[in-house]
Amino acid sequence: MSFKMVTRYAHSPKDIQHYDTKELRDEFLMDKIFSLGDILLTYTYNDRMIFGGVTPKAGEPLEINLDKDLGVDYFLQRRELGFINIGGSGSVTIDGQKDNIVKHDGYYIGMGAKHVVFESDSSDDPAKFYVVSTPAHKTYPNKKLPFKDAIAMPMGNQKDMNKRTIYKYIDASSMDTCQLQMGYTVLEPGNGWNTMPCHTHARRMETYMYCEFGSKDTRVFHFMGKPDESKHIVLEPEQAVVNPSWSIHCGVGTTNYSFIWAMCGENQTYDDMDMVDMHDLR
């Protein structure tokens, strides 16, 4: 088993004005998330979110063990955790309580859980747990979040090539958390744009993990940066990008695709956002 966590720092908008493609990718892209038998994480100084992939082999459970790295006795001593599985079936065991997890199921785990163990039913079709952890100040109840129970929000239209459904798993309208919000967006066939017209939300940062592309040759162009100084990063399947709170976050793909979004920061109001006029984009 390989465990790896890399650190990414926070940036001023002025920092990225002169970044070339490599520098932009080095600072904001997580290019490898799922590796069979491994835990691969990124710690970003943007609101101190930790995100990444846990991909167990069958019969070889994985547990995120972080203590000295975070100055605590165990990983979730001062944190909460959410995950969505985009792989095969598996399970999670939280302090001895086991739940089966099928594809697209999610989970919220409150501060104070000491042991969170991930398992796959098959190595040929392993579970792929995309995990996100944020600082917490209070313990809220653990909650399994089946895909069938997610809050579905149809958005967009075919004419504007942004017809999609936003599935809200961890959301303040349906459950309590300290600050974590998390969901899964699915674009309809023939649609490529997400979150366009775009916006910023200065009160929260966000990560996007793009997945379930139409083919291995599909690519997503993810746009970030200030509205009047936009940059882009080209993503392959199952890669993620960090968006600071001052940055736009939208994208377009060569075919339809899905992505998992996660937010944390000053508030939990999903629609607290500052829309960007299309005339102001540069």
Image: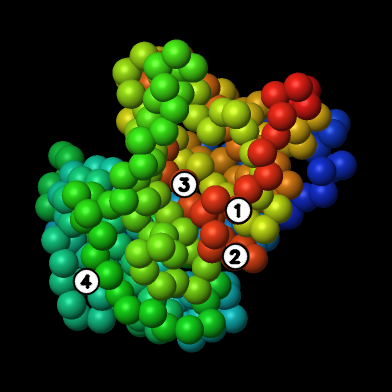
Q: Secondary structure at mark 2?
A: loop
Q: Height in image: 260 above or below 227?
A: below
Q: CA distance from mark 2 to mark 1?
A: 9 Å
Mark closer to the observer (4, 3): 3
Q: Quadrant of residue 251?
A: top right
Question: Considering only order in the chain, which callout, 3 or 4, is on the residue closer to the N terminus?
Answer: 4
Mark closer to the observer (4, 2): 2
Q: CA distance from mark 4 to mark 2?
A: 30 Å
The reply to whether residue 43 is visible in this rendering is yes
Mark closer to the observer (3, 1): 1
Report the amino acid beneath label 4. Answer: Thr
Q: CA distance from mark 4 to mark 1?
A: 35 Å
Determine the residue positioned at 44% across, 64% down: 172
Q: Height in image: 201 above or below 74?
A: above
Mark closer to the observer (4, 1): 1
Q: Check contact, mark 4 vs mark 3: CB within 8 A.
A: no
Q: What residue is disc 4 on? A: 93
Question: Considering only order in the chain, which callout, 3 or 2, is on the residue closer to the N terminus?
Answer: 3
Q: Check contact, mark 2 vs mark 1: CB within 8 A.
A: yes
Q: What residue is disc 3 on? A: 261
Determine the residue positioned at 55% across, 72% down: 135
Determine the residue positioned at 49% across, 17% down: 160
The reply to whether residue 36 is visible in this rendering is no
Question: Considering only order in the chain, which callout, 1 or 4, is on the residue closer to the N terminus?
Answer: 4
Residue 267, numbered circle: 2
In the rendered view of the protein, which quadrant contains the C terminus? top right
Q: Height in image: 185 above or below 251?
A: below
Name the image colouring. rainbow
Q: What residue is disc 1 on? A: 272
Q: Quadrant of residue 88?
A: top left
